[in-house]
Image (cartoon, rainbow, N blue to C red):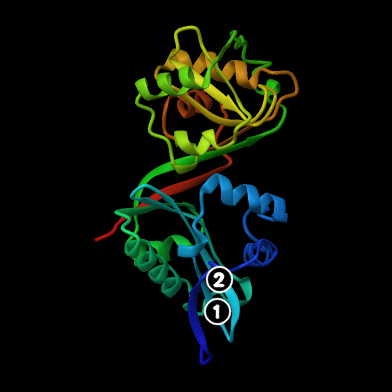
């Protein structure tokens, strides 16, 4: 590509311009990634994106790709990285990622995480710049949850409301290892949420708002706990069930045993920085 190509930070970009670039670059993705400016504002807050250290790649002074860097102590996370569909296949993504990793190194990060759909061609680029696969994560987006159990005679159990402190303390004791968007500090930024657990405190779920709102987090330390939790969460009348970045655990095993497979799979990846 014999054009003027350069990289720059997103430090001075406006919210509306960033939203426009986001929507343009994610056009035609595997699922709808369209944001409004308000969606973008919330996403930047939840992810704690540092625009000062996030990178854009420009062709003839037009942004045609970006990488958003979230920072948590000495850890970094790619909160979104994409190239405009009109500029894909031109060798722009790798230099964008190298620039992003250089920026992450410059602020003292020890490593960077990301998640990528298994069928996404970006996976090969991430590997080429040094990211390695850590584990598989599962994404569930299901409508009409009660129907999944109506012919299986799985009874919903009663879950008890729990304080945020009780919820995360029990989750820590269960040695649940969440992906980035399920980390404790990330989830707490939602502000308005409710937590439920089973009576033995071996399984729990967190909802954005009340317990009829989307499920943000679910975990279980035992097979029995997964049965209690999922049968109750999915057993709500006419409820949908959405859960992202679920590692291979008792929750996934229980769902799979009842014929409920993930709608998509991701790989959690990591690169150690010098």
**Label 1 CA crowd tier, 10 Å (few <14, some 14–19, many 20+):** some
- Please, is residue 61 above or below residue 102 in the view? below
Farthest residue toward the left?
Answer: 274
Looking at the image, which residue sits at the far right? 238
Q: Tag count in the figure?
A: 2
Q: Can the viewer see residue 245?
A: no
| Left-right relation of 257 to 144 | left
Reply above or below: 98 against 261: below
SS label for mark 2: strand
165 to the left or right of 65: left
Q: Position of residue 104 (x, y in %)?
A: 37, 61
Residue located 65% across and 31% down the image: 214
Instruction: Please state the horizontal and vertical placement of residue 158, each as a whole percent of the image.
Output: 60, 8
Please tell me which residue is depicted at 44% across the width and 60% down the height of the picture. 123
- Residue for badge 1: 58
State how far apart marks 1 and 2 are (Cα).
7 Å
Residue 158 shows in this picture:
yes
Residue designated by label 2: 65
Please provide percent x and percent y for residue 115: 46, 50
Quadrant location of the C terminus in the rendered image: bottom left
Closer-to-camera residue (160/33): 160
- Residue at x 32% of width, y 63% of height: 105
How far across and how far down the image is residue 133, in percent? 35, 51
- Camera-side residue: 196 or 191? 191
Query: Where on the picture, by quarter, is residue 213?
Result: top right
In percent of the image, x 53 and y 26: which residue is there? 255
Q: Earlier in the sequence, mark 1 or mark 2?
A: 1
Q: Against 258, is 45 above or below? A: below
Residue at the extreme bottom of the image, as rendered: 2
């Amino acid at each position: 590509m014999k054009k003027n190509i350069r990289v720059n930070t997103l430090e001075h970009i406006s919210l509306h311009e960033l939203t426009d670039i986001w929507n343009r670059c994610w056009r035609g993705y595997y699922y709808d990634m369209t944001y409004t400016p308000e969606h973008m504002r919330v996403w930047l807050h939840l992810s704690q994106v540092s625009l000062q250290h996030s990178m854009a790649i420009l062709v003839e002074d037009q942004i045609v790709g970006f990488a958003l860097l979230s920072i948590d102590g000495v850890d970094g996370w790619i909160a979104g990285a994409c190239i405009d569909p009109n500029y894909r296949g031109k060798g722009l993504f790798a230099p964008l990622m190298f620039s992003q990793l250089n920026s992450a190194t410059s602020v003292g990060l020890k490593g960077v995480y990301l998640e990528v759909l298994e069928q996404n061609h970006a996976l090969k680029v991430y590997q080429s710049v040094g990211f390695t696969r850590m584990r598989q994560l599962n994404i569930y987006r299901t409508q009409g949850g009660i129907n999944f159990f109506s012919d299986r005679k799985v009874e919903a159990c009663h879950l008890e409301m729990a304080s945020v402190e009780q919820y995360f303390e029990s989750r820590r004791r269960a040695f649940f290892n969440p992906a980035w968007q399920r980390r404790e500090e990330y989830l707490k930024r939602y502000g308005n949420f409710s937590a439920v657990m089973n009576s033995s405190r071996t399984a729990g779920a967190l909802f954005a708002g009340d317990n009829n709102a989307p499920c943000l987090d679910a975990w279980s330390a035992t097979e029995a706990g997964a049965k209690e939790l999922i049968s109750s969460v999915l057993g709500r009348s006419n409820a949908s069930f959405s859960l992202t970045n679920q590692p291979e655990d008792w929750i996934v095993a229980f769902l799979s045993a009842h014929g409920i497979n993930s709608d998509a799979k991701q790989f959690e990846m990591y690169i150690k920085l010098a």
